[in-house]
């Protein structure tokens, strides 16, 4: 008579398998976390783009429709509009700066750092994911929004011409050079401003309150001390060059010229500029200090 065995089927014993760091992709999910928690990263540029479009409707479309001369209408509607790109690029820098000031300070203030430190994500991954927002994510978002805004402007100009009975003179789409110039400009600005973002992240990881003041006041104090002690202004000039000095390194011609041709781009000169590599080295040192500070700094 056969009896049913209650024993479990035997399986070969082996080491337990756990997902590796590559499979879990901690950097990817850390960046996703930043986008989930900081919706202003993409909402603020969209709001600014909407304001720019409203201004375009009033200042350009309204002015063109009010004109009687068809040639003047065409001249107004066909002129290139660089204002939208300039405003959105400047806004991306401001958004990135304020994001960095709150990136590491915010999680210490609301004590959520205790939860995030319990996860198998290193401090290096966390800081690099936060640094990637102003250096990579914001430029990409800005690029997409600027292109979309310019396309909407083109459609509005074409519609205004159709309303005016000027369909035969509808402006041609923008040159393919413009997206390339925009992408190049965003990469240049992000790399040039890297030490600024590194400094703001370091202050965010250290300051207990008034993060903005701790980021700005030491620079102002050192500049005043230099002026009083040595009657020089090297530090303000250095900061000014770090803010806008990329223009002379990455583009040819006068610094006030409108960049509308790829012949004005000088990537070789930019990549060989000592200021670029010195800034990147300083940014790396500041980010390393921010990693160490996050590792040992307690919640507020």
Image (tube, helix red, strand yellow):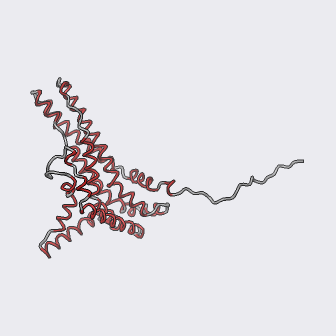
- Where residue 185 sits in the image (x, y, percent)? 25, 50
Q: Is residue 156 left or right of residue 30?
A: left
| Residue 248 drawn above or below residue 45 | below
- Where residue 159 sits in the image (x, y, percent)? 22, 28
Q: Quadrant of the C terminus?
A: bottom left
Q: Is residue 273 left or right of residue 2?
A: left
User: What residue appears at the point 20 percent right and 63 percent down from the top-left corner?
Assistant: 239
Viewer-nearest residue: 95 or 174: 174
- Where residue 182 sits in the image (x, y, percent)? 26, 46
| Residue 34 drawn above or below residue 167 | below
How many labels sit on residues? 0
Q: Is residue 221 left or right of residue 17?
A: left
Residue 131: name its quadrant. Answer: bottom left
Q: Is residue 104 left or right of residue 118?
A: left
Residue 220: name its quadrant. Answer: bottom left
**Furthest residue toward right:** 1
**Furthest residue toward left:** 69
Viewer-nearest residue: 92 or 139: 139
- Where residue 7 sits in the image (x, y, percent)? 78, 54
**Furthest residue toward top:** 165
User: What residue appears at the point 14 percent right and 34 percent down from the top-left corner?
Assistant: 76
Residue 210: name its quadrant. Answer: bottom left
């Amino acid at each position: 008579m056969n009896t049913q065995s209650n024993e479990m089927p035997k399986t070969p014993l082996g080491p337990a398998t756990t997902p590796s760091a590559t499979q879990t992709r901690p950097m990817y999910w850390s960046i996703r976390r930043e986008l989930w928690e900081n919706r202003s990263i993409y909402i603020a540029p969209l709001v600014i783009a909407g304001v720019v479009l409203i201004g375009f409707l009033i200042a350009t479309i309204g002015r063109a429709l009010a004109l009687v001369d068809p040639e003047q209408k065409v001249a107004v509607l066909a002129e290139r509009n660089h204002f939208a790109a300039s405003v959105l690029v400047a806004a991306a820098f401001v958004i990135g700066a304020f994001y960095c000031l709150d990136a590491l300070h915010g999680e210490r203030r609301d004590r959520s750092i205790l939860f995030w430190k319990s996860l198998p994500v290193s401090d290096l991954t966390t800081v690099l994911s936060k640094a990637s927002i102003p250096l990579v994510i914001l430029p990409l978002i800005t690029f997409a929004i600027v292109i979309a805004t310019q396309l909407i402007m083109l459609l509005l100009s074409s519609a205004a011409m159709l309303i005016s009975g000027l369909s035969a003179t509808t402006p041609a789409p923008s040159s393919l050079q413009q997206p390339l110039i925009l992408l190049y400009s965003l990469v240049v600005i992000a790399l040039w401003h890297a030490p600024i973002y590194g400094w703001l992240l370091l202050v965010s990881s250290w300051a207990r309150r008034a993060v903005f003041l701790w980021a700005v006041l030491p620079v102002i104090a050192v500049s005043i001390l230099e002026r009083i002690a040595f009657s020089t202004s090297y530090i303000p000039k250095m900061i000014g060059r770090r803010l806008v000095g990329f223009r002379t390194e990455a583009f040819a011609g006068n610094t006030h010229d409108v960049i509308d041709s790829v012949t004005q781009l000088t990537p070789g000169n930019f990549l060989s500029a000592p200021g670029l590599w010195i800034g990147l080295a300083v940014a790396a040192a500041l980010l390393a200090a921010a990693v160490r500070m996050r590792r040992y700094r307690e919640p507020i």
